[in-house]
Image (cartoon, rainbow, N blue to C red):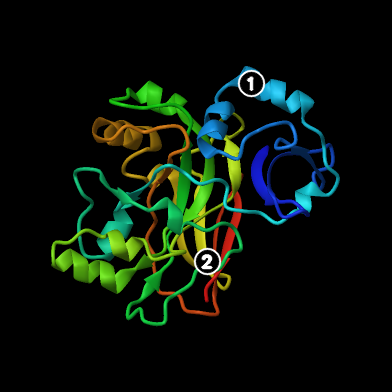
Amino acid sequence: MNQLRRALAPDGSPHWLWVEPNDSATTKTAIDLTEAGLADSLPEIAAWLLCPDAREALLGIAPAIDGAQDWPLLLPGCPPKAICLGKNFAAHAREFGVEPPDELVWFAKLPSVLVGPDEPVLIPRWLDTRVDPEAEFVLLIGAPLHEATLAQAESAIAAWALGNDVTARKQQGLDRKREWPWLRAKNIQSFGSVGPWWTPSDCFAPSPDLQIHGRVDGELRQSGALGDLIWSPAAALVEISRWCALEPGDIIFLGTPAGVQGVSAGQTMTVEADGLGLLSNPVK
């Protein structure tokens, strides 16, 4: 499965790498797209992923770098917008005592709070609330969408990754009772991770049975299948695009399965799905 990684080069600069399996299943070749001129811009990269001619042209001139597949991974780009779906697994809605909503529930995750693979999620000492990890699939948008059709929405999905929509749960509940937005409960600095890389859509055809797993210190907390989503990826994009134009580089968290529980400093959260790798973040 091809991977588009953002990684830290030995000189301290971020590089975009195209990593693909060799004939040996245990080895991979890393092609340095940054050396070939690819900008460190998620909107440009997302649009590039959906342009086969431009992609093949750049891959044809990008050099292979020995050892680059072992460079530390970084947050795979800063999105212009990050939108999260709420209660998009029926069982997750019911574990909080409510029925699944009739309409799509969505909210903002501020891009500046996001961290990448292996970066710590930091719980402020002053925060008096349970903190919950939420394992999620994440989409990368590669083409503009406004009042999109289902076919347009499907074709605009440039890549897939994993995410963790970390939530200050008690604060979310308090703000909900006050009829306030959820914004601060979802947007404490570092309360969200994306990675470990982007898997391009044209080499990834997820089945409804594709499972996502959320673990804390190796203990399985959450598990759900893509087919269990109330709103499919394309249907969600259609609905969001009625209200808000989506642009290349925007990302969408698709919602979390049931099983959310609190996490504490000293623990490690992971999100995993076949074909999309493993996203790990320590809690401090």
What residue is at 50 percent from the left and 46 percent from the top? 78
| Relative depth, front residue between 134 and 176 | 176
Q: Is residue 121 left or right of residue 180?
A: right
Image height check: is 111 above or below 262? Answer: above
- Residue ID for mark 1: 54
Looking at the picture, which amino acid does disc 1 mark?
Ala
Looking at the picture, which amino acid does disc 2 mark?
Arg
Where disc 1 sits, the SS reads: helix
Q: Is residue 111 left or right of residue 94?
A: right
Q: Quadrant of residue 170?
A: bottom left
Image coords of residue 250 (percent x, y)? 43, 39
- Residue ID for mark 2: 215
Whether residues under marks 1 and 2 lie with C-beta atoms below 8 angstroms apart, the answer is no
Is residue 73 at least partly visible in the picture?
yes
Q: Nearer the viewer, mark 1 or mark 2?
A: 1
Image coords of residue 21 (percent x, y)? 77, 39
Image coords of residue 32 (percent x, y)? 75, 38
Q: Earlier in the sequence, mark 1 or mark 2?
A: 1
